[in-house]
Amino acid sequence: GDAGSGVPTRLLTNAEVVSARATPDGGAVLGLRHAETGAEREWPTGAVIMASGYDAQAPRILDGLGDRVHRDARGRLDVAREHTVDDAGTLFVQNAEVHTHGFVAPDLGMTAHRNSRILRAITGREDYAVEERIAFQEFGLPDDLPAAGSGVLA
């Protein structure tokens, strides 16, 4: 369901993934357990986005993927620019890349931006606008002149 948002997705809170298996169509069937109620069920899905919190350690579920998951010499996830950790660009992570992306990795203010980019990469469409330029400040002198009345200050 999309809860009237127009975005065909569901966000399940306090749901722990206790198992996962691939399906022939490229999707997955997840075994879920609700952390508060203890209820368990299987959940078929076309894609998996895991929110593992702010722990700097990779979720253990990635261990089962072996060499598909890129790691650096210290065993940390080797996260690419687009937040992927595999050659195919299909395994995305967030808040696991302070050592590769800097101190803004766990910054909640950047989460919406990162989520938009990840969803765009997964779905091939832009459900949420990805702002490419969000700052007014420029480092260096521009080649073009300001438009009349633009309010450009130096």
Image: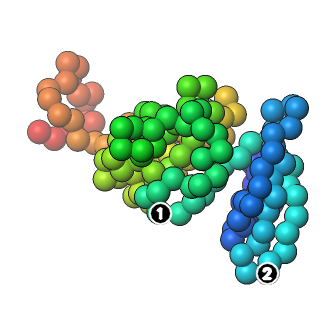
Q: Vertical placement of 82 versus 49: above or below?
A: above
Name the disc covering residue 54, or none: 1
Seen from the viewer's position, the closer of residues 81 and 18 is 18
Q: Going by the image, does 47 lie left or right of 104?
A: right
Q: Position of residue 19 (x, y in %)?
A: 77, 55
Name the disc covering residue 135, or none: none
Please say whether residue 118 is visible from this viewpoint: no
Q: How many C-alpha atoms fall within 10 Å of the one at disc 1: few (<14), some, or many (≥20)?
A: few
Q: Residue at x 71, y 75 (%)?
A: 35
Q: How many C-alpha atoms fall within 10 Å of the one at disc 2: few (<14), some, or many (≥20)?
A: few
Mark sitting earlier along the chain (1/2): 2
- Secondary structure beneath label 1: loop
Q: Position of residue 123 (x, y in %)?
A: 69, 34
Residue found farthest to the left = 154
Q: Vertical placement of 40 versus 24: above or below?
A: below
**Contact? badges 1 and 2 (CB < 8 Å):** no
Q: Going by the image, does 105 lie left or right of 35?
A: left
Amino acid at circle 2? Thr
Q: Residue at x 53, y 63 (%)?
A: 53
Q: Quadrant of residue 142?
A: top left
Amino acid at circle 1? Tyr
Q: Going by the image, does 124 lie left or right of 74?
A: right
- Secondary structure beneath label 2: loop
Q: Position of residue 56 (x, y in %)?
A: 43, 58
Whole-angstrom CA distance, mark 1 to mark 2, is 23 Å
Name the disc covering residue 37, or none: 2
